[in-house]
Amino acid sequence: MNEIEWSDFEKVELRVGTITAVDDFPEARKPAFKLTIDFGEDIGTRKSSAQITDLYDAKTLIGRQVVAVVNFPRKQIGPFMSECLVTGFAREDGAIVLISPTEAVPNGSKLM
């Protein structure tokens, strides 16, 4: 494992946001959703493509808080522009488990 400096970690903006909209993404190479996430007043709303269809559906995602990197450059994914990276862990079967706070926190809160 490569060690990093504390200053490297401080550069990554891991923020919490609430999913406000979920759309299918049929053009994606692997099954995915297009998410709209509210990160609060300072950051605003961002969109992300997320390959999380194995464990989640649109109904259960709306209103869920997730942790995302909000300071990566935008990334074109097919016809969609992803503006943040939603974080999760891969299970042994490849399904992604989202990272979420266990208690509600204000949108835009930074991971400390």
Image (cartoon, grey):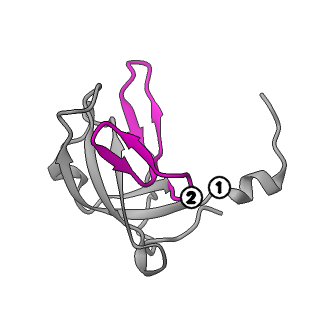
Residue 21 included in the magenta stretch of the image: no
Residue in view at x 40 percent, y 38 percent: 97
Residue 108 versus residue 88 in the image, above or below: below
Residue in view at x 52 percent, y 62 percent: 15
Find numbered disc 2 in the image and state the secondary structure of the residue it sits on.
loop
Q: Quadrant of the N terminus?
A: top right
Q: Say whether residue 87 is left or right of residue 1.
A: left
Residue 4 in picture, x, y percent from top left? 81, 43
Question: Which one is in front, 68 or 26?
Answer: 26
Residue 54 in picture, x, y percent from top left? 26, 30
**Badge 1: residue crowd in 10 Å (few <14, some 14–19, many ≥20):** some
Q: Specify the segment rendered in magenta.
A: 69-98
Question: Gap between marks 2 and 1, in whole Å?
Answer: 7 Å
Residue 8 versus residue 79 in the image, above or below: below
- Circle 1 residue: 12
Write down the quadrant of residue 63 in the picture. Answer: bottom left
Q: Say whether residue 106 is left or right of residue 112.
A: left
CB atoms of marks 2 and 1 within 8 Å: yes
- Three-letter amino acid code at the position of disc 1: Val
Residue in view at x 47 percent, y 73 percent: 43
Residue 8 in picture, x, y percent from top left? 77, 51
Residue in view at x 24 percent, y 52 percent: 61
**Badge 2: residue crowd in 10 Å (few <14, some 14–19, many ≥20):** some
Write down the quadrant of residue 18 in the picture. Answer: bottom left
Find numbered disc 1 in the image and state the secondary structure of the residue it sits on.
loop
- Three-letter amino acid code at the position of disc 2: Asn
- Name, please, the residue furthest toward the bottom: 41
Q: Nearer the viewer, mark 2 or mark 1?
A: 2
Q: Which mark is on residue 71?
A: 2
Residue 71 included in the magenta stretch of the image: yes
